[in-house]
Image (cartoon, helix red, strand yellow):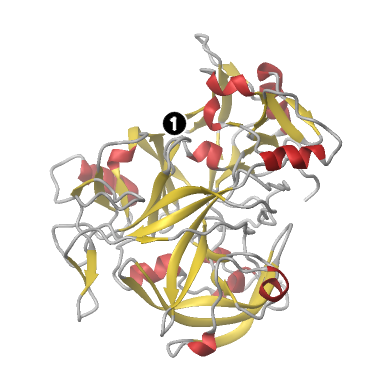
Amino acid sequence: MKSIVGWKALCLLVLDFTSVVSASSASAPKAVGFEFERKRAPPGALSRRSNVDVTLLNTQNSFIYVANVSVGSPPQNVSMQIDTGSSDFWINTADSVQCTQRSCPFGTYSANASTTSKYLNSNFIATYVIDGNATGDFITDDVSFAGVTVKGLEMGVGYNSTCLANIWGISYSAAEAIVAYSPNGTYNSGGMYNNSVLQMVSQGLIQSPTYSLWLNDVAASAGSILFGAIDTAKFQGPLEVLPIVTDPVTGKLDALMVNLTSISLSTGGDIPLSVNATEFPQAAILDTGTPTITVPTDVFTNIANQLNVTVVQGIALCDCALANSTATVDFGFAGLNISVPMKSIVEVPTAIDLALFAHTSQQLPPGTCIFGIDPLSTGNIGTMLLGDSFLRSAYVVYDLANNQIGMAATNFNPKGSSIVEIAAGSGGIAAALKASASPSPTTSGSMPSATGTSSSVPTASTTSAGMLSVGGEWKQVLALLGALTCLTLSTML
């Protein structure tokens, strides 16, 4: 990482766990849904994965996903940051450096206090670009949420950790710490294990290693993540299926990235203004842990010139009135265009922003806001990050089995839900969409809200045989935590 490109206001998305449908009912798809709230949290550094050529110090306005879970027997309650950029599930311990010298607001875990934990090895090492690292053991233990229990989940225990958060990575198994590098620093594909997504499949909670992400409008208080299914009520227009591309740094399929084919700026004219000055296509990661958007430097410069964006002390600034503009930044993928409105990009500075900026001996003029697009620190070549500023405008389906990502324009604030299961097999997203076009026994109704007011979709409960069955109303476990965490791809040294 070579440069700091901005300070932002930090928000925390807190997940409310709710199982969406039954796993044993033949008339309902297998899926597990999580609804989250948007909450503001204290500032701090957000780490990035090491093979992305950009350094972000986002002390504010960074959106992360945190879920309440119970681990072990008797249950130990912790909160996990959900990360699409890594693959390991790991938790801090109370005697780590982070917890003894600073704080662990997300909770801690003791393997010795759990009768269901099983030691595997001491090869867990997670490294972070900006702030934090963790070393410790790999173990297995049971993890429960929303009436669902994942048995024997392999996870890391951070006995020596300087990272604030417990991380729940949901990317490829190829991105697991023990897989990426062996203790001597060589690639170790033989160490791959079933992470949480694959373990849910193996235990029949979902049919396929897939999940859908919906952040909703920038002003909305809740969005959702849906494992094993698509909610067709939450997008509009066609959902295009794009191939996941090989990571240009590692040469492997180990990151959730697709090819971006164009970037343009629509300012109300008949013809969008192309701001491409870089050869496309270029790889871009669809990253839930990144608050902003990073683009090649020349693309950023062209956008900045058109919108009167200035860069002061490494921070992109603009007139706050730009948020009310009809202008959009349009991102092109093969056969698909996602338009991101200015209100999703322009961020009103908080008191923390102003204090941090004043620390640099600068003063933000009245009416000045932070612009949520940043340039790559490496110039025009590098992996772009499409974070929350982009993802609020896109409904994204991740299919880890078929190496595909489905994407469509978001349907903001829809009435109800229409859940379509993604079955196992090569059909994947396309087959699910085809099934949804004809009468099928899918569950319709609204996802339970963060306040627990919706009950139009049945809950999932556990039978003595360990299968899920429909019964009762939606069950809600509300997680409310406010703290900063570090997020990145976990790797073995």
Q: Nearer the viewer, residue 453 or 487?
A: 453
Q: Is residue 434 visible?
A: yes
Q: Quadrant of the C terminus?
A: bottom right
Q: Position of residue 473 (x, y in %)?
A: 20, 59
Q: Residue beneath label 1, please?
A: 336
Q: What residue do we see at 14% from left, 62% from top?
A: 26
Depicted 208 relative to depicted 202: above or below = above
Horizontal side of residue 74 vs 440, given as left or right: right
Report the amino acid beneath label 1: Leu
Q: Is residue 152 left or right of residue 255?
A: left
Q: Residue 329 placed where, x, y %?
A: 56, 25
Which residue appears at 25% of the width and 45% of the height?
446
Say which quarter of the image contains residue 401: bottom left
> Does residue 259 appear left or right of residue 219 in this picture?
right
Label 1 element class: strand
186 or 129, nearer to the observer: 129
Asked where in the image residue 179 lies, by quadrant, the reply is bottom right
Where residue 467 appears, x then y in whole percent? Answer: 22, 74
Q: Position of residue 70 (x, y in %)?
A: 42, 74
